[in-house]
Image: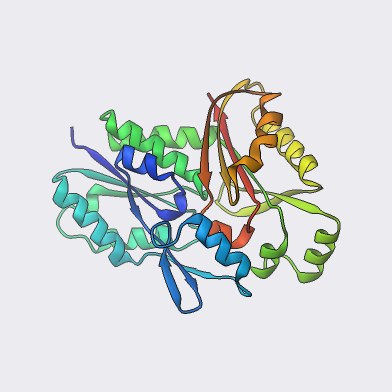
Amino acid sequence: MSRTVIVTDSTSDIPAALIEQHGIVVVPLRVLFGNESYSDGTEITASQFYKRLVESPQLPTTSQPSPADFVAAYERIFEQHPGCYILSMHLSSALSGTYQAARLATDLMEGDHEERVQVWDSKSASYGFGMFVVHAAKLAAEGKSLEEIVASTEELRSKRALYFLVDTLEYLQKGGRIGKASAVVGTLLNIKPILSIDAEGVIYSVDKVRGRKKATARMIQLFQQDLSGVTKIKVAVGTTADPASVQDFLEQLSSVFTIEETLFSDIGAVVGTHVGPGTIAAYIWPA
């Protein structure tokens, strides 16, 4: 049976050790601070990015890979693994043109290579889809077919719940997602927005709670509603700051669920540009 190679982009925020362990190919986006351009995750780390973000008077911008970048990545894989298939898994098409660039790349492939690449819209962001990439890579290593990998990953997507807790309204305001007046009032009232991503891959506001502790408690209530009847879970936590800042959340979570596995991920530059430092993202699915 032909091997399947898993490709993703840098917004999947997969820890480097897992990328190496599972042989995942990552095509990076770029982050721009004025005229300075950095390859996301390689030329600028998450910690370096957030330091620059806080110091910068304006939001940085990001640029997606070009179709040519994906063609180059795919062709390298076909050279290394003749006859393989490629599953290319990307940031929600509602949030970025990265998925579309990968789709366009397949039209530029020669021979039967176009038919050997499947591009998959995660309809999610950060490790919210990085977990799907890792899951797919594990199945590929077991020798599962491309069709089996996609079916299993879509089943996992249907079971997973996710919420982001934003610590400050400053970056949502800078990015134009909320008005300046709302940001000022919200900051004065210590409002913490809870965000999620809908079935079409669009970020939306779920609730707004005063104070961080109440906000994390509200997140856990939401997870209980989404995972009704589930007692044992796996959890991945993405942060834009010190991972130690999520310990209170995990302690609250463990009081209502049995946590079988915990993974930490750094929220990268693309999502971080809009949510800012101090954000917690939690991704939970049945164990």
Give whichever of 106, 6 is nearer the camera.
6
Q: On the picture, is 54 further left or further right than 158?
A: right
**Residue 138 lies in quadrant:** top left
The N terminus - image quarter: top left
Locate residue 113, reporting x and y percent.
19, 53
Locate residue 170, reporting x and y percent.
71, 64
Q: On the picture, is 260 further left or further right than 68?
A: right
User: Which colour style is shown?
Assistant: rainbow
For the question of whether residue 95 can be seen, the reply is no
Residue at the spot 49% in from the left edge and 53% down from the top edge? 92
Residue furthest bottom as drawn: 35
Q: Is residue 261 above or below residue 101?
A: above
Locate residue 269, reporting x and y percent.
51, 59
Locate residue 143, reporting x and y percent.
25, 30
**Residue 70 lies in quadrant:** bottom left
Give whichever of 68, 242 is nearer the camera.
242
For the question of whether residue 60 can be seen, the reply is yes
Residue at the spot 44% in from the left edge and 61% down from the top edge? 44
Residue at the spot 61% in from the left edge and 74% down from the top edge? 58
Q: Is residue 14 above or below residue 184?
A: above
